[in-house]
Image (cartoon, rainbow, N blue to C red):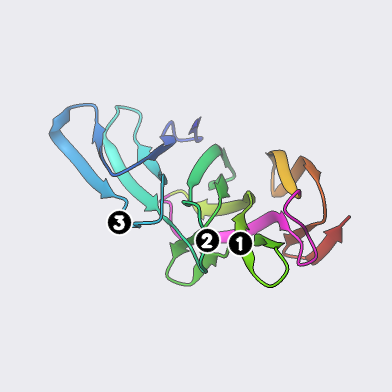
Amino acid sequence: AVTTDADNNFYVAGSFADMAYITGIEGLEGDYETIENSEADSRTAAFIAKYDADGNLLAVKSYEAALNMDAYELTNVSVSKIVAENSKIYAQFEYTGDIKVEENLSLVAKYAFYDFGGWGMAVLTNNVSVISFDSNLENAVPVASLAIADNGDPSTAVRTFNFTVNGDDVYVAAIAMGNLTLTTSEGSETID
C-alpha cells in the first residue's frame, strides 16, 4: 500500500517473512533500517515506512503477530491500506495474532473454537483494525476493528474490509459472515 500526504511525503506498507532491509533512494549505500520478524509462530510481519519527496527514508515501524493461546496454525499480519488525511496516517491492519502497535496499544486477536466432544482446537480467524498515527508514525489510536464475536463459530469470517477518510470522519465497510463485533471509540456492537 502507498499514500502521500500534503507535504509530499510518501508512506509505503508491506509484509515480510524473516528479515527485510527498508532502504531510501540510495539503497543499501545510504540510510536503511533492518527489520526482523522474531516471532517463531508467525508467517508474516508488516511494516510502514515514511519517505520524503526525494525518496529519503524518514521512519520505519514494523509489527509482528503472536499467538495468545495454543493453536495449530501460524499467525500473520499485513497492512493492506494506508491513507493520509489531516496530518494523520490511517492504516488497515489484517491479522490472525496479537500485534503490539506501540507500548500502550496492542491489537488482541480473537479466535474461533472447534469442540470435538471433550477436546477442542483454536482456529485463527481474520481480525481487521484501522489505526491512526501522527505523520511520524507515532501516537497510535484505534479507530475501528471487526472480529469474530464471543459467540462466533469457525465459519465466521471477515471476507472483505475497506475504509475511507473524509476530514476527521472515518467510514468502514465490510462483507462478512457469522457473528462479529465492531468496535469503535463509541463502543462495541455485535452483528449477527
Residue 7 spot, x, y in % from top left: 45, 35
According to the picture, the residue beneath numbered tag 2 turns out to be: 71
Q: Earlier in the sequence, mark 3 or mark 2?
A: 3
Q: Earlier in the sequence, mark 1 or mark 3?
A: 3
Residue nearest the observer in this picture, 154 or 39:
154
Q: Residues within 10 Å of mark 2 (few under 14, many from 20)?
A: some
Give the number of the mark in front: 1 or 3.
1
Mark 3 residue element: loop
Marks 2 & 1, CB-CB < 8 Å contact: yes
According to the picture, the residue beneath numbered tag 3 turns out to be: 38
User: Residue flagged by tag 1: what amino acid is it?
Assistant: Ala
Residue sitting at the far front: 117
Residue sitting at the far right: 192
The range drawn in magenta is 136-155
Q: Main secondary structure of the magenta part?
A: loop
Q: Earlier in the sequence, mark 2 or mark 1?
A: 2
